[in-house]
Amino acid sequence: MQDCTKAVKEFVEEHYTAVTVVLVTSVGLFALRRWLAGGVCRSKARLDGKTVLITGANTGIGKETAVDMAKRGARVILACRDMGRANKAADEVRKRSGNGNVVVKMLDLASLESVRALAKDVHQTEERLDILINNAGIMMCPQWKTEDGFEMQFGVNHLGHFLLTNLLLDLLKKSTPSRIVNVSSLAHETGTGVTTYALHPGVIRTELGRHIFPSLPLWKRILFMPFFLLFKTPWQGAQTTIYCAVDESLKNASGLYYSDCALKEAAPQGRDDAAARRLWDLSVSMLGLA
């Protein structure tokens, strides 16, 4: 043991500068990783007797959010496109939460017919809807179009969720106080007793970037690999969603923007009321909701 200690001491003395650089770098990276992880939802609020619907809940932050909602006692609806993966995710959510009241419903946000079918199903089978979490999304995909001819990102991330929210709004109003949580930038709807929240979850290791990485040249993929270690985990990324869904301090707040479990000022484009109204009116027209 003494020989080992002596050898370590001699090594440190001979390579003092290198050892110091390694230690300082390690501590710096650890501190940076902790800072990038963001805030954590501390609310202990229970959701017994309440119903939560989460889109895209079969993976990533959607699944972590579902686990948290189920642990709080809610009935959780996973609204997903891939039913095989959704059923597998539901089994995991039930197991991790100890709550068997987790159901799967079909939703393809690239199909307005599918969105309307889900909304009809929910109205027919659910007595209430307390929290709607618009979580699903797609990013930098090829030049695809939705079933209805819209550009895929706009159709899925905005129009699909816009239609779903409007079709479920009456049930949300019936279940007040209720909440709508948008994990992307959407127009805000303020119905009586229904509060809305938009949020940025952070940079997270999820499948959202699945269309980006394979398209990069090999040298760029190698260059970016170390940065992935600094990304949030799905659990860390879900914290702001959970915060907006359950935190008691937000019950009287609506139409605001959050990041890292805290109120943040939206970008100038997000504060343009005239542009928001135009987007709202255009979306209503495109979806035939007028």
Image (cartoon, rainbow, N blue to C red):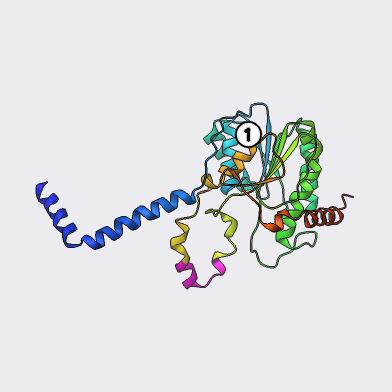
In the image, taking residue 208 as reference, residue 290 lies left or right, namely right
Q: Where residue 78 sits in the image (x, y, percent)?
A: 66, 41
Closer to the camera in the image, 287 or 57: 287
One can see residue 148 in this view? yes
Type of the residue with mark 1: Ser
In the image, taking residue 17 as reference, residue 235 lies left or right, namely right
Locate residue 142: give its quadrant. Answer: bottom right
Magenta-drawn segment: 214-223
Residue 266 drawn above or below residue 261: below
In the image, taking residue 72 as reference, residue 119 lies left or right, namely right
Identify the residue shown where x is 75% and y is 60%: 146
Q: Where residue 213 sits in the image (x, y, percent)?
A: 54, 65
The residue identified by callout 1 is 249
Characterize the local packing of mark 1: few (<14), some (14-19) or many (20 or more) Cα atoms within 10 angstroms: few
Closer to the camera in the image, 260 or 208: 260
Q: Where residue 174 sits in the image (x, y, percent)?
A: 79, 31
Identify the residue shown where x is 10% and y is 47%: 2
Mark 1, secondary structure of its residue: helix
Residue 247 drawn above or below residue 223: above
